[in-house]
Image (cartoon, rainbow, N blue to C red):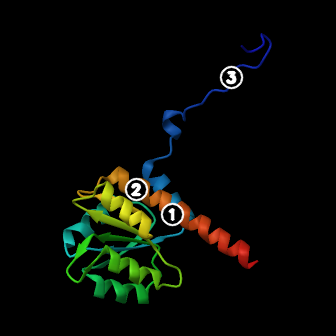
């Protein structure tokens, strides 16, 4: 129990209605202040790429696309990708082949596997072999944004550790 003469507890003050920052202003500031995250979306279905683009709209992301492992290998060799969203089954391989491609990169991106049959078995296998996470389809925007946020924090932490160990 607080003492009688103690200060009152701190309170949160809301913005006056006319001075609230507008959502578009906040998004613009975030886009200016945060580095862009380069994402590779791998799926044979062009609709999957469009959905991911809509889910991530307004975030500081640049999305490249590939339909299969062969195209993904070409993208990974040309661009520095931070995060890969890959369909679990592709015409020329699976997410495991994508993971092999990723691990050959000098700065391997994080792998997030998407699947209609996302279950505990797939999730455990992906994490145990070196993937970052699994997302069930259809994509839940809140879940995808949360996973991407934690992935970007992981990437920033890893970059900070690399800089510290090099210095």
Q: Is residue 153 above or below residue 82?
A: above
Q: Secondary structure at mark 3?
A: loop
Q: Secondary structure at mark 2?
A: helix
Q: Please give the label number shown on residue 9.
A: 3
Whether residue 167 appears in this view of the structure is yes
x 52%, y 59%: residue = 30
In this rendering, the label closer to the viewer, 2 or 3: 2
| Label 2 to label 3: alpha-carbon separation | 34 Å
Residue nearer the viewer, 140 or 131: 131
Position of 2 compared to 97: left or right?
right
Looking at marks 1 and 2 on the same chain, the residue that comes earlier in the sequence is marked by 2
Q: Please give the label number shown on residue 145.
A: 2
Residue nearer the viewer, 42 or 59: 42
Do the CB atoms of the residues marked 1 and 3 lie less than 8 Å apart? no
x 31%, y 61%: residue = 122
Q: Is residue 128 above or below residue 104?
A: above
Whether residue 131 appears in this view of the structure is no
What percent of the width, then of the height, locates residue 96? 34, 76
Looking at marks 2 and 3 on the same chain, the residue that comes earlier in the sequence is marked by 3
Q: Determine crowd level at label 1: few under 14, some 14-19, many 20+ residues with C-alpha closer than 10 A.
A: some
Q: Determine crowd level at label 3: few under 14, some 14-19, many 20+ residues with C-alpha closer than 10 A.
A: few
Position of 19 compared to 147: left or right?
right
Looking at marks 1 and 3 on the same chain, the residue that comes earlier in the sequence is marked by 3
Q: Is residue 63 above or below residue 17?
A: below
Residue 4, quarter of picture: top right
What percent of the width, then of the height, locates residue 77? 42, 89
What percent of the width, then of the height, locates residue 1? 71, 13
Reading the image, the residue beneath label 1 is 152
Do the CB atoms of the residues marked 1 and 2 lie less than 8 Å apart? no
| Label 1 to label 3: alpha-carbon separation | 35 Å
Residue nearer the viewer, 36 or 15: 36
What percent of the width, then of the height, locates residue 143? 36, 52
């Amino acid at each position: 129990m607080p003492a009688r003469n103690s200060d009152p507890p701190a309170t949160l003050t809301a913005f006056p209605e006319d001075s609230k920052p507008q959502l578009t202003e906040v998004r613009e500031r975030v886009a200016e202040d945060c580095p862009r995250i380069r994402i590779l979306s791998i799926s044979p279905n062009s609709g999957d790429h469009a959905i991911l683009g809509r889910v991530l709209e307004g975030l500081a992301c640049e999305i490249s696309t590939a339909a299969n492992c062969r195209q993904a290998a070409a993208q990974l060799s040309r661009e520095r990708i931070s995060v890969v969203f890959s369909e679990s089954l592709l015409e020329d391989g699976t997410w495991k082949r994508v993971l092999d491609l990723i691990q050959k990169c000098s700065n391997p991106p994080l792998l997030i596997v998407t699947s209609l049959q996302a279950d505990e078995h797939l999730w455990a296998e992906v994490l145990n072999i070196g993937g970052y996470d699994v997302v069930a389809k259809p994509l839940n925007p809140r879940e995808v944004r949360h996973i991407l946020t934690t992935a970007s924090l992981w990437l920033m932490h890893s970059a900070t550790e690399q800089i510290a160990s090099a210095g």
